Image (cartoon, helix red, strand yellow):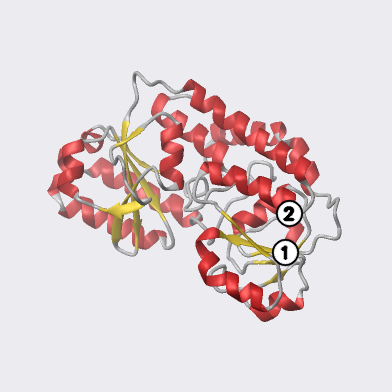
Amino acid sequence: MKKLFLILMSFVLLMSVTACSDKNPAEPSNITQAPDKGNSEDNNSEQNNKEDNSSQGDDSSENENPENRVVATSVAIVEILDALGVNMVGIPTSSYELPESVKDATKVGNPMSPDMEIIKSLDPTIVFSVVTLQATLKDNFDAINIESEFVNLNSYEGLLESIKLIGEKTNVKDKADQLVKEIEDRVNKVSENKSDEDASTVMIIFGVSGSFQVVTEKAYVGDLVKRAGAINIIEDAQSGFIPVDIEYLASKNPDYILLMTHANPEESKAAFEKEFSENPVWDNFDAVKNDKVIALDSKYFGMSANLFAPDAMEKLEEIFYGKE
């Protein structure tokens, strides 16, 4: 258990630099910032990724369609639009470090409840938000006569379709197709290298605000784990996140336990530490005995699909197969 606590402590230190979803994202591999400065091997990999995507980075600095006046209400959408070189006049209010291209864009408020008056004043050609907020925001955009589009970032396939849709709606279809191809090439390379014969079993735990849920294949990270060739011990789930049944999970005894966090990393750390120390059932897990409790970096493994999908797949390949 001491080794497990060391893992969790390292996990928190890592998470304190970042947060998942729309709180403190790193920039995708086609942007100049290197996410993991503490690991020289990761840094070399990141640099290679940037060189491979150099044409994509050049494209993002030029806006071929200046008539675009786009508002993005999600950080992940901002990153996609930046990669496509689309002009943004409005962006979400967030503590994330956003691309240089939007430094002069107006902040329109929280992604879940953007300020409609500010958005209307920007006279946008279109507003992009996520499909999970469509029921909440669609009528509001209609009321101010602003065209809106809601993209699905709940899965890897949803990410690719979202990029294509954004490209069509902003008249940069060719760039979108190229970006999709670059992502697919890297992700497919990992998928092709997976070993079905030696597939590892995996449990993904999501912790936030003192509570736990198990992540299934219906969620974005669960989807990536499946594509990387691992077997989620939760099968045929109807939703992406389900309550923890510790006795059932113990009976499945996964090879790996992957820890995923969101929001306040200190709260997640305390919750994980308390759970593993006070519940002796965890001592029976082979993953715990074999030091295969892995903290997932939220820069790559967030709640929503993003341009880090290829990087995340390569990191999963390293976890499951020792490939870098």
Residue at 68% in and 81% down? 117
Q: Looking at this rendering, what residue extends furthest in the bottom direction?
A: 117
In the picture of the structure, the residue carrying the numbered disc 1 is 126
Q: Are marks 1 and 2 in contact (CB under 8 Å)?
A: yes
Point out residue 253 in the picture as x, y percentages from the top left corner. 21, 36
Q: Residues within 10 Å of mark 1 (few under 14, many from 20)?
A: some
Taking the spot 42% from the left edge, 57% from the top edge, the residue there is: 262
- 283 left or right of 231? left
In x, y percent, where is residue 207? 34, 56
Residue 115 screen position, x and y as percent: 63, 77
Tally the numbered discs.
2
Q: Residues within 10 Å of mark 2 (few under 14, many from 20)?
A: some
> Can residue 307 be seen?
no
Residue 229 percent across, percent down from the top left: 41, 28
Give the residue number, with chain letter if any, for mark 2. Answer: 169
- Alpha carbon distance from label 1 to label 2: 8 Å
In the visual, does 245 lie left or right of 229?
left
Q: What element carries label 2?
A: helix
Element under disc 1: strand
Give the residue furthest to the top.
197
Q: Is residue 177 above or below residue 93?
A: above
Q: In which quarter of the image is residue 272?
A: bottom left
Q: Which amino acid does label 1 sit on?
A: Ile
Name the side, left or right, on which 122 lies relative to 94. Answer: right
Q: What residue type is labelled 2?
A: Lys
Camera-side residue: 104 or 249? 249
Could you tell me if residue 270 is visible in this image? yes
Looking at marks 1 and 2 on the same chain, the residue that comes earlier in the sequence is marked by: 1
Rendered position, 306 above or below 75: above
Q: Which mark is residue 262?
A: none
Q: In which quarter of the image is residue 47?
A: top right
